[in-house]
Amino acid sequence: MNTYNTALQWHSIGISVIPVLVGSKRPAIASWEPYTSRLPTETELRAWFRDTRYNIAVLTGNGLVIIDWDDMWLYSRWLCSLDGAFAKVAQTFRVKTARGLHLYYWCAEKAFNMHGNGWDVKGHHGCCMTPPSFHPSGAQYEAIGQPSNILRIDSVNELLPDYEQQRAIVEQAQQHVRDPLAAAMRGPMPMSGQFDLEKIKRELLYETMVKNLCRNGRSRRGTCPLHDDRVASFVIYADGHYHCFGCGAHGRDQITLYGAIHRLDFGETIRELAGEM
């Protein structure tokens, strides 16, 4: 199936897709933020994908979740850990990547982008290359099954037990930011003690972690601190979330990036930063 027909197929099931430059993971449009809340029009899809110079990426969220396994040994261990009730989940629509495997699910619960032991979850505000695209290494993404085979789950925690703990930490930290008074009435986060999340964010600047930052419209672009980035593929958007179109890293703020650089989960990151600031 060619890229244009693939775009129409995703569009028909309510999933936004965007064009991506061949030879990289960088989008071929100025911003994909508008398409997190609306589908591209068929006119836009035709303009993007009737030209074969572009790869294609799906935007996750709105029910679609992708679990990205880069370590196939850990993936095999995960499969062995699934009991009979969930063994079938590995039979959902899958994509072979240059290094591993993407597993696609419809999830009833809102899923966060999250980094775990051998896996990444691409959820709300996530972006993921999909067939028939080519990885920058030259390897082509290969579909196993059809998008119509995507299985439904209630929660990512059904598949990744560690995800629930990290999700709860993220949600509780967000509540401290959204409603400090209500959070104060409930008391501090149990595993982090007293801390001021907003103070941490004010003092932990992206500029201390991302080199060569420059403004690009409403966003900023620089070199990614998570890989050997020579083309400034790291983008920080107006709302503070980031995405690297070189290595695929993504997160909601500079706290998440600090954790990714130092290989800490969210709770460990907060404890460390709260102790330093």
Image (cartoon, rainbow, N blue to C red):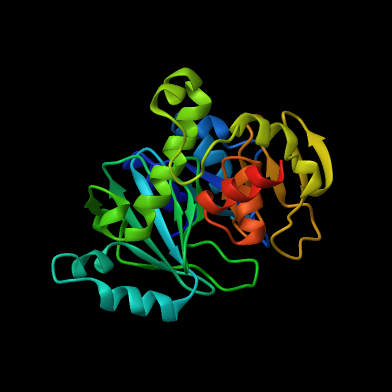
Point out residue 184 in the picture as x, y percentages from the top left corner.
Answer: 46, 24
From this view, report whether residue 47 is shown above or below residue 1.
above
Nearest the eye: 90 or 117: 117
Q: Measuring 58% from the left and 48% from the top, which residue is drawn there?
A: 271
Point out residue 185 in the picture as x, y percentages from the top left corner.
Answer: 41, 22
Q: Measuring 45% from the left and 62% from the top, which residue is drawn there?
A: 68
Nearest the eye: 10 or 69: 69
Q: Measuring 40% from the left and 46% from the top, which residue is drawn there?
A: 167
Point out residue 11 in the picture as x, y percentages from the top left corner.
Answer: 38, 41
From this view, report whether residue 63 is shown above or below residue 88.
above
Quadrant that contains the C terminus: top right
Nearest the eye: 99 or 56: 99
What number of labels is visible?
0
Q: Measuring 77% from the left and 50% from the top, which residue is drawn there?
A: 209
Instruction: Report whether residue 5 is seen.
Output: no
Q: Quadrant of residue 227?
A: bottom right
